[in-house]
Every structure is written in C-alpha cells, then in structure tokens.
Amino acid sequence: MTILYDVAVLGAGAAGLMAAATAQQGGTSVIVLDHAPEAGRKILISGGGRCNFTHLDTRPENYLSQNRHFARSALARYTPRDFLALVEKHRIAWHEKAAGQLFCDESARQIVAMLLAEAAGCTLRLNTRIHDVTRGEDFRIETDGGVLAARSVVLATGGLSIPKLGASDLSLRLAKRFGLRIAPTAPALVPLVLDSPLPELAGVSLNIAARMGKTSFQDGMVFTHRGLSGPAILQISSYCAEGESPLLNLMPGVDALTALREVKRERPRAEPAALLAALPQRLARAVAAECLADAPKDLANMPDRRLAMLAERVGRWRPVLAGTEGYAKAEVMRGGIDTRDLSSQTMEARNVPGLFAIGEAVDVTGWLGGYNFQWAWASGHVAGKALAARAR
C-alpha cells in the first residue's frame, strides 16, 4: 500500500527544512527526502562552520534574477528579524561579524538542530535517492526505498554548487519535466581564474573596488595560485557572464593618477617603485617589474604619460580571465527555475497545481553575507504557509 502524504519535500537543506517545518506546523502531513546521510550539509560548512544565517539589511536589490522583483514578496513576509526571533527562541547565541552579517557564536550545527526541532512532526528519510516523480491524481515519487504519494511536492534540492556535498540537478530536471522553464545556470560567488596565473603573488591580499557595468563592490581581494578570490571577487563574479572580466581598482577611494603625481612631486629623487608604496610589497614589485622596467631612475624624470599608464594599471585593471573555479568552489548557483513560471506569493508553479520550488533551485541568487540563507528561509516559509492552506 502506497502511503499518501499532504506534502513531499525533496531536499533536507535550508529551504526544504523551513518549508517542511512551516507546512507541518500548519497541520499537514510532511515527508522530507534527501540522498545525503545527514540534513543541512551546506549549512554545516557555511561561515567557516558558524553559519552566516542571515543579513539584517536584506533587500530585493541584493539579489540577481531575470525578474529582480520576484523575491520582494517572500522577503517582506519573512524577514531577517523573523528568523533571528527563531534563533533566539532556541537560545542560540549569535554575533554580528560585519555590518548586518549574523553568525552563530558556536556552531552551524545549532541551526540544523533548530530546523530539525521545528520540523520534528515531519517524517525524515535520509540516504534516500529519488528516481522519478510523476503526476496523476496525486504525485507519485519513486525512491530506492519504495514508492510514496503526495498531494504536493516541493523542489528544494538546491543547485549545482559544491558537488562534493552531493549537489545535483534533480530540481532542475523535474521542473523541466513538468514544463517549467530554466534560466541559464552558472557558478556564482566563485573565485576567478587568470589566463596567466601569478603564483608568486599567492596569499597577497588588499582592499579593492570591483566593477561590472553599474554594479560595484569594495572589499577584500586575495591572489591565489590560479587567480583571484576574496569577498570583492566573489561578489562581482556573480555579475560576470562567460568571457567577461571585471574592472578592478587596486587603490579604491583615491584618484590613482592624482595620487601618483603627488608622490612624484613630494619625492622627486625616489625610485619609480616608490609610486606603488600604497600596495602590498610583493604586488608593488610585480607591478613595477611589469610597468616600470624601463622607466627613468628617479621620479623627477618620469614623464606624465608613464604615470598615466601606471595609474590605468592600478586604478583600472581588467584582468584577462581563463574562467572561474567552477561549481566545485562556487558558493551558489546563478539561474535556475524561471520565476515567470512560479507565483511570487506562494512559490507554486503557475501551471502545475501542487508543485512548488524554493531556495537555490529558483532563479534568485543573493550576494555574499547571509542573503542566500535569508532567501532559503523566506521562500521556504511562504511555500510552507501556502502548502498548509492548500491542505485545509
């Protein structure tokens, strides 16, 4: 005999557990299925093991999507303060690491334990692979542990990022099977790979401004053995289409040419490398070797055109990229289930009653700093509310 549930949630991650808990507390019978051996695996590794669980200043503008307004409803109906209230209800100590970014004082495991406690009335099946989902009068879900049925199904298996944790395209494949469109996917919040790596600079870090079009971020950058990483790079990577490179200012907050002219005026007898004293030493040497190898021996004889060339190099560096580090190092996936096919109020598919999609699987991608978790909580919550209302 096939067991019939009100709701089957595919995926025991952040969004899935939130949807399951909310739906079950609204009076529905819920089963959560996941092929992983434990729930919330991505939560567990986030924030260095302390989980950057939200950002207090979350706004729709902090997200990328083909429809930038889609996330507005869910984010307004379940806010960072709402999730923080849940954290405090479970007596989880937290701190604000940077402006608006909230972390657990102790461990990300506390967030997973909190979500499992909230979803305690649900049936949880881990180590369970989903082979197929079809729809007749109800949804039929075939797993390696047998067949079950549900009146509603929630696609919450996440995206393609961090495959070592078991990331899969299951939600995307099932969405396509049910006729939903898929916005082009790509790694996001991901380190960049230089076409000509600079391993001699590996570990050098500095504050930069990174820009793509009208979007810019000022934060840290670090050179790696293969390319560039750090918060500013991860942020801007989400805005770089294949073949594009961001514009990097290695001296943010100052006019590079004006600053170099000032050094020349104040230290005319200094060697050309003195122009780059504001940069980390190893980086300054590398830039000097590239741009000043045949320069005059002192600044007094340095022509303004050379200063202008150097200012362009440090103030408007557009690195030549070979690509990104891919899904293996990406924090999230960009793109996903097309929001045109979902209700922003409920996360239900417009043309497939009972089918819902939430979290990273949907074409809503947040900035670095807790925004993606807040989308998981918000989308899971509104879906859970809608599922409870649908079952009544």
Image (cartoon, rainbow, N blue to C red):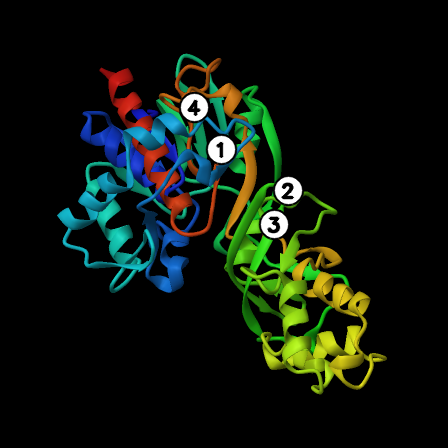
Residue 177 visible in the current orientation: yes
Which residue is depicted at the point 64% across and 57% down?
248
Residue that label 3 marks: 211
Q: Position of residue 343 (x, y in %)?
A: 42, 19
The residue nearer to you, when weighing 201 against 167, is 201
Against 247, is 284 above or below?
A: below
Residue 162 visible in the current orientation: no
Q: Please name the amino acid that badge 1 sits on.
A: Val
Residue that label 2 marks: 213
- Which of pointers 4 and 3 lies earlier in the amino acid sequence? 4
Q: Is residue 127 left or right of residue 277?
A: left
Q: Position of residue 169 (x, y in %)?
A: 56, 39
Residue density around tag 1, few if under 14, some if 14–19, many if 20 or more, within 10 Å: many
Residue that label 1 marks: 362
Which residue is depicted at the point 28% across and 62% down?
107
Residue 140: mark in rendering: 4
Q: CA distance from mark 2 to mark 4?
A: 46 Å
Q: Quadrant of residue 214?
A: top right
Residue density around tag 2, few if under 14, some if 14–19, many if 20 or more, within 10 Å: few
Which residue is depicted at the point 49% across and 13% down?
351
> Pointers 2 and 3 in contact (CB under 8 A)?
yes
The residue nearer to you, when weighing 181 against 53, is 53
Q: Quadrant of residue 325?
A: bottom right
Q: Position of residue 362 (x, y in %)?
A: 49, 33
